[in-house]
Amino acid sequence: MIKLLPAANSERLSTIDVLRGLAVFGIFFVNVLYMSTTAIFFERNSIVPQGESAIDRGVRLVIEVFFTGKCYPLLAFLFGVGFCLLLNRAEQKGIRVYRFFLKRMFILFVIGAVHMLLLYGGDVLRTYALLGCLLLPFYRRRQRTVLKWAVGVLLVFLLMFSFSFIQPESVLKDDNASAYSTAEQGAAEATEAYRSGNYGEWFNFHLREDVLPALTSEQITYPSTFGLMLLGFYAGRVQLFQRIREFMPLLRKLRLWSGIVSLPVGSVLTMIRLGAIHAGAYEGIICQYLIYGFGIFLSFYYLLSMILLLQKPVAQKVLRPFQFVGRMTLTNYLLQSVISFVVFVGFGLYGKFDLLQVAGYCFAVFAVEIGLSRLWMSRFRFGPLEWVWRRLTYGTLKQPAGWSARNGSGHDHGSAS
């Protein structure tokens, strides 16, 4: 029987590593608000906390405009690229690709479920595992078919979001009036549970107010995530990352148009949050639509800009540290939750940081992860959790030592691989 092992060093696409490293940090900028503050209880009700300082409002606005709903699409896209590369390589080895990939996704789902249950209710690994399985029927479809489905699914996502505007304004006013008191109550209960120092008390609250609400609402993100996975798969099929220079004229045009769409979207969102535009009872819905719906265009702008930027030697040198983070995406994603759990639950610091301090905490975690990733990858070919994932998938994989940045790295094209 032919054994499938990770790809050789020559197959590493460093652009993908850098993009994944940047994406996982961007996701943390958003997740940390829910890990360290009561923001989730207000966002869940499409409202903004009252009485914030000018600095907090400014930091929140920056995160909403530039990060929220912008980074998970990047990781989903790269997941689709990894799906294509992984299955192509598996098929070349004579592996039964469907069975192999389903096993890999099952392991990822279990990891995500444990993460969600014990640490953070906003886990994305389960979503990627579930939707990743839906990519399999497209594996042998024509490129044009994959592209049509990807665009179609994303259009359906935007259409689904627009249904929220059908609600009468009178109903929204009543909902908004009760929503704020509900959010305040949830925030107060969260603060008590997180600072209690009692893991059992926190865990009960976490299951009731973090995990269950997430399970009932996360489906709204499925169409956009799956559509972006399909786009990533299409990019893998046309060998985008191996033929970047050939695609540069097209990439520049797409970047221009995604920027043209993103600029007014970000401007309108900013003016609404600053009170320059009043949307009445529909304000919450409009902001959610701009952040999570049309925010996809800014995601594309980021993606295309970074791909083009990374063709320059200076940019490659500056962004090189993110390569190491990108090669340990799974480890770094989960490590962020572990560190934050210790800080905000273990030390009882939940709700005690203002948003500027939270941003500083993010950068501190980033610095630690870059340092640890570089150190680890200077000695080993795979990140620790990446190795566990492979061990469970391949069965006979051993962690090779002796790797250094001068002689290559292991293969890991997105969470799919």
Image (tube, grey):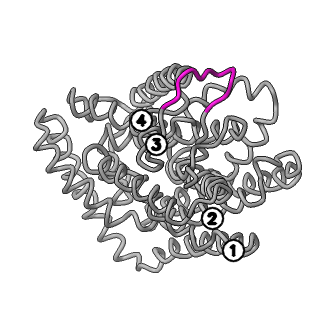
Front one among 358 and 152: 152
Which residue was labeled with disc 1?
141
The magenta region covers 399-409
- Please name the residue shown 39% across and 63% down the image: 218
How far apart are the alpha carbons under marks 2 and 1?
A: 11 Å
Disc number placed over residue 248 in the picture, else none = none
N-terminal of the two: label 4 or label 1?
Answer: 4
Which residue was labeled with disc 4?
56
- Please name the residue shown 52% across and 54% down the image: 272
Q: Nearer the viewer, mark 1 or mark 3?
A: 3
N-terminal of the two: label 2 or label 1?
Answer: 1
Quadrant occupied by the N terminus: bottom right
Look at label 1 and name its amino acid.
Arg
Disc number placed over residue 230 in the picture, else none = 2
* Secondary structure of residue under mark 2: helix
Which residue was labeled with disc 3?
396
How far apart are the alpha carbons under marks 1 and 3?
A: 32 Å
N-terminal of the two: label 3 or label 2?
Answer: 2
Q: What x and y, as percent, mark residue 103? A: 44, 59
Q: What x and y, as percent, mark residue 313? A: 81, 27
* Secondary structure of residue under mark 1: loop
Q: Nearer the viewer, mark 4 or mark 3?
A: 3
How far apart are the alpha carbons under marks 3 and 2?
A: 31 Å
Q: What x and y, as percent, mark residue 378? A: 56, 20
Residue farthest to the front, as pictured: 1
* Secondary structure of residue under mark 4: helix
Question: Magenta stretch mostly in which secondary structure?
Answer: loop
Q: Nearer the viewer, mark 2 or mark 1?
A: 1
Please indicate whether residue 1 sits to the left or right of residue 110 in the image.
Answer: right
Front one among 91 and 254: 91
